[in-house]
Amino acid sequence: MARPPQGPDYTKQEAVINWPEEVPPWTQPPSQPDPTYSRGLREADVGAAPGSEAAGGGPMTKLAQWLWGLALLGCTWAALATGALGLELPPSCREVLWPLPAYLLVAAGCYALGTVGYRVDTFHDCEDAARELQSQIREARADLARRGLRF
Amino acid sequence: MASEEASGGSRRSRREPEGRVPRQDKYSVLLPTYNERENLPLIVWLLVRSFSESGINYEIIIIDDGSPDGTRDVAEQLERIYGSDTILLRPREKKLGLGTAYIHGMKHATGNYIIIMDADLSHHPKFIPEFIRKQKEGNFDIVSGTRYKGNGGVYGWDLKRKIISRGANFITQILLRPGASDLTGSFRLYRKEVLQKLIENCVSKGYVFQMEMIVRARQLNYTIGEVPISFVDRVYGESKLGGNEIVSFLKGLLTLFATT
């Protein structure tokens, strides 16, 4: 069943009135510029993006999750910093806002170096385990030789 | 044997209705080997002792990939000493991948759990009872040994190796958020059907293979428990971490990052 290509045909008024409820919008031919259709699609896309795995939607790769997150942060920052939202931020706020990405990058780098450094420093040296293993190896060799193993 | 007596006892003590649970848990250890003539008898001896002390039903499957150093001969001697129901030899003609070694070994495994470990003595069998306890505690699909948590650690690594290891682990955690702290380790316990499913889904090799197993496990919603282990780097034989390994690790990491 195809939608009539022109405007409402008054000879079939009933069908025209009922039509939008009977047929879901996504079954409409895409050639029809329908504002509800395209808005619905965009909302569904955005809504599915951040937690699509948890929501049981299509799997999203880790790369895509990162890109989404960065895009979201980037857009927020750009909108605030350029004043695109029409918000009048106090000048002191703007001064902080402009170099914020650079600050965050440096902070992330420091966090990474600090964390890795701390973990390297606290990495356990299992001296005891090595000693225990050496004595068990001697024990094993003696026992296996007694059982007739030729090494 | 002591192990049989003890396992019979634990079966009675669980008081399960006759016939409803026909099979007791059995653990199949897969030992892929290549030139491990020195280490194989020792690891088998340690495994047998650890299992019999804790009364666990087990078998050891040795998958030797045609080692030229006579590993197979030693394995046959071990089979004679410990019996062919405890030591199963399932050799292959030549060196093939680790994933296929696991598939090959699993075909012959009669246990409902599979334990994977290195045969070079870097993984100590004393941790296996802890793995089993952990698995029962949380009814986990996978229990992974970890060098990076709790009392876990390493022996025989210099500062450079530690930095590379910690750095690689940090980047991996940030990028993949895998839900397990040690991705490149290979001392793990799996439910048999879970391991089968994971191997079907994994495509990579080497270090990345172990990493991909955990990442896929996450995707398939399997649960993962962790037990801290001490990793004693190869006592006999060479252990290398060259530039090639680092490059292939990074490639694998980025591939997983972009595709999972």
Image (tube, grey):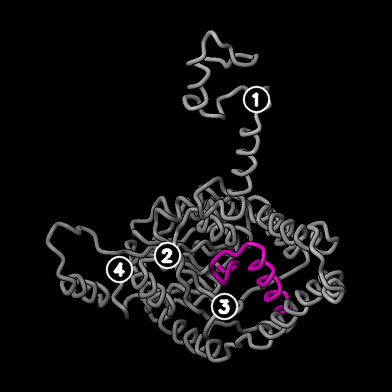
Residue B103 belongs to the span the image colors magenta: no
Label 1 is placed on what type of residue?
Pro
Q: Residue at x 50, y 73 (%)?
A: B145
State the image quarter where residue B178 is shown.
Answer: bottom right
Mark nearer the viewer, 3 or 4? 3
Of all residues, the one furthest to the top in this rendering is A11
Q: Is residue B19 left or right of residue B65?
A: left
**Upstream in sequence: badge 2 or badge 4:** 2
Which residue is labeled 2 in the image? B29
Q: Position of residue B228 (x, y in %)?
A: 50, 79
Amino acid on which disc 3 is placed: Arg
Q: Chain of mark 2?
A: B
Are the residues at dot 1 and dot 4 in contact (C-beta closer than 8 Å)? no
Q: CA distance from mark 1 to mark 4?
A: 64 Å
Magenta span = B160-185
Residue B182 on the magenta span: yes
| Callout 2 amino acid | Val
Using the numbered discs, state the Cα–Cα distance from disc 3 to disc 2 in whole angstroms. Answer: 20 Å
**Is B73 on the left or on the right of B249, as rendered?**
left
User: On the image, numbered disc 1 is attached to which residue?
Assistant: A30
